[in-house]
Each structure stands twice: as C-alpha cells, then as structure tokens.
Image (cartoon, helix red, strand yellow):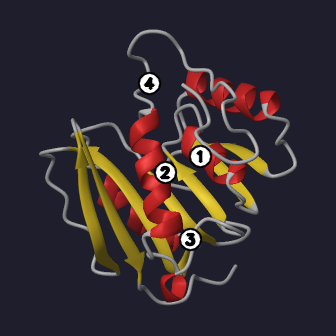
Amino acid sequence: MRVVAGSHRGRRILAPEGRVLRPTADRVREAVFNTLVHGGPGADGKDAVTGARVLDAFAGTGAMGLEAVSRGAAHATLMEQDRTALDFCRANTRALGEAARVTVLGGDCTRPVRAAESCTLVFLDPPYRSGLAAPALTALAEAGWIAPGAVCVVELQAKEAFDPPDAAAPLDERRYGAARIVYLRWDGPDSPQQ
C-alpha cells in the first residue's frame, strides 16, 4: 500500500499482515480523492482537500488522513481505538515525517473526546456491517469534530444498510468492488462550544 499522490507520492504505508485491519485499497483511495479534488463536493464546488482540517475516524493505518496531508490538507487527526492500528498510525506518521501536521488519537469514535477544533473533511471507515457509521457521525458532531458544511466520506460494505443522520445531506454514492463510498455534507447546527 502506498500514498497515491501529492508530496509523499509513492511512499509506502505500513499495514499489519493478515486481516487484522482492512485498509482502503489504493485504487479506491485514488478514486475518492479524485472526487474530493475534482468532483465538486467542497464548499462552492471547490477542492475539499487543500487546506482542510481532516478527521480520519476508524483510521486503521491512517492511510486516508495521510493521503489528505500529502495532497495539501492543513492537518489530520487519526482516531482509532485498536492498539495495533494506533501503532501503525504512529509508525506511518513518523515514516512520512508528518508529526507536525498529524495527530494520532486513541479513542472510540462513538464516544469521542471533545474536539479542540472542528474538521472540514471527515473520513469514516468503520468495520463492515458493524452499524457504527451513523452513530459515530452523530457522536463526532456532538463532540465538535464535524464543522458545519463539512464533507463526510463514509466507506461501507457494498450492500450494507446505512441511514445517515438527518444533519447529513447526501451528495453522491459510488461502488468499487466490495466497497461503497457515500459522500455527505454535514448540514447540522454549529459545532457545540467548549
């Protein structure tokens, strides 16, 4: 697995062997970022990545957040509760020399700590068929992680049921083999104040 584009293009992203984690495939990651940069889901139809504050929830190896930073995001937080995955997030962040622009945060995405600053681009990749995507989006928004107008990208199993929260307006949906990518705009009220 490698960073697809940007300042770290071609750099390797470490992942554990076996099926402990299910990282987003390189081709799916490339398609997602092509949509985010050229497909118009950002504010006023603009690039949703450059300058973004990113949350990579259920981060696994951190591939989505690290790809965003490689492509010009201002900052990424990689949120994960699995200890093995956290170790890989930290190792990948160090290997790319991005400790200044990437925060690795241990925690449950359905019961997150309060955000220091809200994010304009959110990736959610819960375990397939876990039913955690909608509750995690709601919990993250309530904890101040999701900025009003943020683009949220949810990866699900292709035939998995998903009923997004009322505050999430559907933008697009695409399928890539076993994966389904749902693009949403968070139209909820302003993030809660600390």
Task: Point out which mark residue 179 bears.
Answer: none
Callouts 2 and 1 close, C-beta under 8 Å: yes
From the top left corner, tell me how far across and down residue 87 is, in percent: 67, 24
From the top left corner, tell me how far across and down residue 183 is, in percent: 35, 66
User: Tag 3 or tag 4, which sits nearer the N-term?
Assistant: 4
Q: Residue at x 21, y 40 (%)?
A: 129
User: Tag 3 or tag 2, which sits nearer the N-term?
Assistant: 3
Q: Which residue is mark 1?
A: 79
- In front: mark 4 or mark 1? 4
| Type of amino acid at the residue the image marks with label 4 | Leu
Q: Residue at x 12, y 45 (%)?
A: 159
Q: Residue at x 42, y 85 (%)?
A: 188
| Type of amino acid at the residue the image marks with label 1 | Met
User: Tag 3 or tag 1, which sits nearer the N-term?
Assistant: 3
Q: Which residue is mark 2?
A: 109
Q: Which residue is mark 3?
A: 48
Callouts 1 and 3 close, C-beta under 8 Å: no
Q: Is residue 174 visible?
A: yes
| Type of amino acid at the residue the image marks with label 3 | Ala
